[in-house]
Image (cartoon, rainbow, N blue to C red):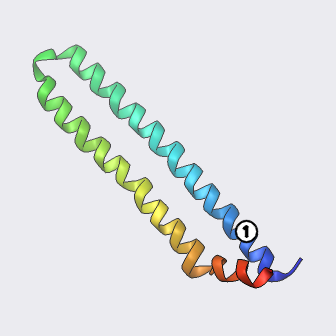
Amino acid sequence: MSPEALVAAFTLLAFGIIVAGVAFGSAIGDGIVASKAVEAIARQPEARPNIMTFMFLGVGVLEAFPIIALGLGFYLLIVVAKVPDLLTHLH
């Protein structure tokens, strides 16, 4: 196996690990935020509008991280490792 093929393979593996890790972490974070919001509403139902506002702010911040990580993953894939160029040279 050529060094270029190894670089392409390991870069694709790193990209998959980045996407899986960020998706898993974001899902856990969304679940925690939602469960804490439900607990807070159960304790103080009259504060529901304020709690929901802060819940959506928290979820919005949490969802920004996967988008940033996906952008960094694609940067790693396309710019740093130049995988598309490597794949065209392998044939």
Q: Quadrant of the C terminus?
A: bottom right
| Residue 62 position (above or below residue 47) | below
Q: How many marks?
A: 1
Residue visible at 16% across and 17% down? 44
Residue 23 lies left or right of residue 14; in this view the side is left
Residue 58 lies left or right of residue 28; in this view the side is left
Residue visible at 42% across and 39% down? 29
Residue 5 lies left or right of residue 42; in this view the side is right
Residue 34 lies left or right of residue 7; in this view the side is left
**Tag 1 secondary structure:** helix
Residue visible at 41% across and 57% down? 67
At which x and y percent is residue 83?
A: 66, 77
Q: Nearer the viewer, residue 35 or 2?
A: 2
At which x and y percent is residue 25?
A: 50, 44
Question: Residue lying farthest right?
Answer: 1
Q: Quadrant of the N terminus?
A: bottom right
* Label 1, residues with CA under 10 Å away: few <14, some 14-19, many ≥20: few
Residue visible at 39% across and 37% down? 30
Circle 1: residue type: Phe
Tell me where residue 53 sits by quadrant: top left
At which x and y percent is residue 47?
A: 12, 23
At which x and y percent is residue 62?
A: 36, 47
Q: Where is mark 1, residue-wise? A: 10
| Residue 3 position (above or below residue 27) | below
